[in-house]
Image (tube, grey):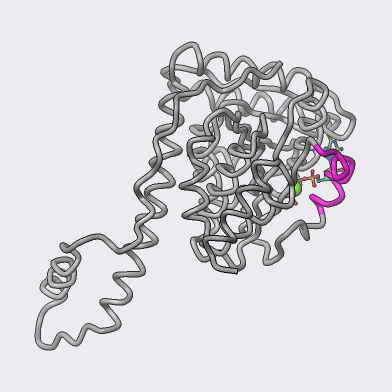
Amino acid sequence: MAHQEAIDALLRDFAARKPRALARAISWGESGRAAELIRRLYAKTGSALTIGLTGPPGVGKSTLSSALVRKARSFGKTVGVVSVDPSSPFSHGALLGDRIRLTEHFTDEGVFIRSMASRGHLGGLAGATADAVLLMDAFGLDVVLIETVGVGQSEIEIAELAHTVLVALQPGSGDSIQVLKAGIMEIADIFVVNKADHPMANQLRREIRSMMEMLNFPGWIPELVTTQALAGEGIDDLWGAIERHVAYLNETGEIEEKRRQAFLHQVRQLALGRLERRLDAELSQDRSHGVDPYAAADRILDAFGGSPEAGGDDVRTARPRATVKGLT
Ligand SMILES: Nc1nc2c(ncn2[C@@H]2O[C@H](COP(=O)(O)OP(=O)(O)OP(=O)(O)O)[C@@H](O)[C@H]2O)c(=O)[nH]1
Ligand SMILES: [Mg+2]
């Protein structure tokens, strides 16, 4: 089947809200082939609430995700979950922890779960994740949860994509302070102290509070919520905090800024990817002799001055303004 026909067929199934179409669309994104799809679907995006959830390995992110999905479902909201593990070579739901933690939602038609790993993403994991979020949004899912393991760059990515960022930490693990030092303070809208059944939970709360005192928050002051995800405790509080943050974003108009930020983030990823490929192509052909590196770089950049790469996917369909739906 010609590519165009394949796209048309996929879009028909997508419009009919067949989960398989969403799954395939995300796979196209993973192999860097979603440009045309996204172009055709972009006008339908913008109404999903995106929640990022990050934190060190084993802190309980998937358990929290599962509890949040249950909560959202109790309000009749449909939910997409993208779980990203940059350190794992496995993909397509093969992440064992997620499989176990999220199984109860596997048969729920209002829930779509997708795991993504580091392997096999032509446009990079960040690009594939951003595409998956857009596709879930266009599919009409009300809430999109993005879970990433906090291993550096991924927290930054999640902060760029999500409206509300949850940073989960667990008591008694020395790495909590490491996480806080690594610039995570700045991206958290809500801190979640999970595993509150642990004797050192209160100490962790104090540590987070005193860290927060050292910072100046110009707008939203991050909330601190304590949960026991496994037992489902504190999830109502967490949901309430998310609602307050979304209300804050809508009332102050910061939601527009968040959108702009997510948009620019993705444009940057796409443009950088293309520049890198062009640069590599130029470098592989460069036979400069006797010039200094600065002159060689100038010469290559001069060669970039011409028309943009054919078939560019940077011209986007305008999207009507939409407000993020409330949570209740
Ligand atoms: N004691 C206790 N254990 C919990 C709690 N929440 C989750 N756990 C357990 O912590 C372990 C890790 O939970 P996950 O939800 O897989 O953690 P995660 O952060 O998603 O882990 P990775 O995706 O591997 O980084 C599991 O054995 C959970 O059952 C809690 O509130 N208290
Ligand atoms: Mg997990």
| Residue at left offset 17%, top offset 63% | 306
127 shown above or below 274: above
> Which one is in front, 63 or 312?
312
Quarter assignment of residue 147: top right
In the image, taking residue 21 as reference, residue 228 lies left or right, namely: right
In this rendering, the answer to whether 229 lies above or below 316 is above
Residue 112 lies, in percent from the top left, at 75, 43
Q: Which residues are magenta?
A: 97-109
x, y percent for residue 285: 25, 84
The C terminus sits in image quarter? top right
Q: What main secondary structure does the magenta stretch of the protein show?
A: helix
In the rendered image of this protein, does residue 326 appear above or below residue 123? above
The quarter of the picture where residue 6 lies is bottom right
* 262 drawn magenta: no
Pick whichever, 89 or 169, lies toward us: 89
Residue occupying image coordinates x 69% and y 37%? 169
| Count of labels in the image | 0
Image position of 191 with respect to 112: above or below: above
Where residue 215 sits in the image (x, y, percent)? 46, 24
Viewed as shown, does residue 130 lie left or right of 77? left
Q: Residue at x 82, y 57 (%)?
A: 96
Q: Quadrant of the N terminus?
A: bottom right
Q: Residue at x 53, y 24 (%)?
A: 212
Q: Position of residue 53 (x, y in %)?
A: 65, 38
